[in-house]
Image (cartoon, rainbow, N blue to C red):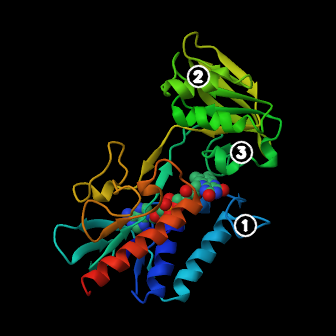
Amino acid sequence: MIIIGSGPAAFTAAIYAARANLKPILFEGFSSGTPGGQLMTTTEVENYPGFPEGITGPDLMINFRKQAERFGTEILSEDVIEVNFSSRPFKVRGSRSEFAAETVIVATGATAKRLDMKGTRDGEFWQKGVSACAVCDGAAPLFRDRPLFVVGGGDTACEEALFLTKFGSKVFIIHRRDELRASQIMRERAMRNPKIQILWNRVLEEVGGDSVVQYILLKDVKSGSQERHEAGGLFFAIGFTPNTEFLKGQLTLTSNGYLDVKPGTSLTSIEGVFAAGDVQDHNYRQAITAAGSGCMAALDAERWLSAREL
Ligand SMILES: Cc1cc2nc3c(=O)[nH]c(=O)nc-3n(C[C@H](O)[C@H](O)[C@H](O)COP(=O)(O)OP(=O)(O)OC[C@H]3O[C@@H](n4cnc5c(N)ncnc54)[C@H](O)[C@@H]3O)c2cc1C
């Protein structure tokens, strides 16, 4: 069994597979993303069950990794560059090694899109008031009773803004056009909420502050004028890029690039290849749901192998 990825989904699949004596080989990635996945880029994780005081993202992922290794997972610090699922055994080519496998679990996650400008980068205010996940970070004390800003115009932007109304003094949606892309129901919910204001025809130009975000600069695209707003936080809700580039032509993808799985299972378009975590889930995108689907993929793969007496 080969597992591709190294977030909560991949390591959970590895723990289950290794305990079932399947001796999984796990490609954790190298330059394809952060080994350990998205949680390596965050500080406190306060909603992962089992840690009543919270745990940092990197500590949580180190624990996942150790638990997978404890049962005999072999971890390779390589990217998977190419796969060939046209016949079995499947071929998986990494940046240094190549393997044949009877079954493969793909758990390569997704990358949150963020705008690259002054103040939003790593080492600036990323994770110091700038985030790409309101559900994950919104409850942090940093955002309490402060003006919060959401960049986007789709359903996710409306959903994140509505969620943030529980914490912020006021929530602003920054949208570059004069009409939201969101579905009518989400649009109405956001526009009806007295704590939400939409800043039409605006684009973000800069995020600033001292140790955390204090203000943002916006440009009015119609008049060209610049505005400064006091801000306690800025949330990007401009989508995710699922890490499926290396799978094109091998597995069926949805129109937005996610792996297409049979609903309620981890089964992909190729028998013997399974998918778990954010790479197949544009809806929930949480560590716990990724871990749960990693467990499903390992159980599906184990049953598939034993049904064929492999
Ligand atoms: C800033 C931030 C904060 C968050 N906070 C929380 C939180 O508090 N609570 C919560 O539940 N969720 C949180 N999330 C969401 C959570 O991190 C994700 O839902 C979860 O990590 C998804 O897990 P995953 O296993 O699907 O993949 P990911 O965590 O996305 O990991 C996939 C990894 O696979 C590897 N990979 C990719 N391509 C290849 C390849 N070709 N070859 C080999 N390896 C590859 C990379 O190393 C990549 O990082 C947060 C997300 C972000 C961005």
Label 1 close to label 2 by CB (< 8 Å):
no
Residue 186 picture location, percent across and down: 56, 29
- Residue at point 35%, 47% (across, down): 257
Of all residues shown, which one is farthest toward the top? 223
Q: Earlier in the sequence, mark 3 or mark 1?
A: 1
Q: Earlier in the sequence, mark 1 or mark 2?
A: 1
Residue under numbered circle 1? 55
Q: Report crowding for label 3: few under 14, some 14 to 19, many 20 or more residues within 10 A (C-alpha).
A: many
Query: Which mark is on residue 138?
Result: 3
Residue 150 picture location, percent across and down: 63, 33
Q: Which amino acid does label 3 sit on?
A: Gly
Q: Report crowding for label 2: few under 14, some 14 to 19, many 20 or more residues within 10 A (C-alpha).
A: few
- Disc 2 residue lies near ligand 1 with CB under 8 A: no
Q: What residue type is labelled 2?
A: Glu
- Disc 1 residue lies near ligand 1 with CB under 8 A: no
| Front residue of this view, candidates 133 and 117 | 133
Label 3 close to label 1 by CB (< 8 Å):
no
Tell me the CA gap for discs 3 and 1: 16 Å
Residue 3 picture location, percent across and down: 39, 73
Tell me the CA gap for discs 3 and 2: 22 Å
Q: What residue type is labelled 1?
A: Ile
- Figure check: 95 above or below 159: below
Query: Which mark is on residue 188?
Result: 2
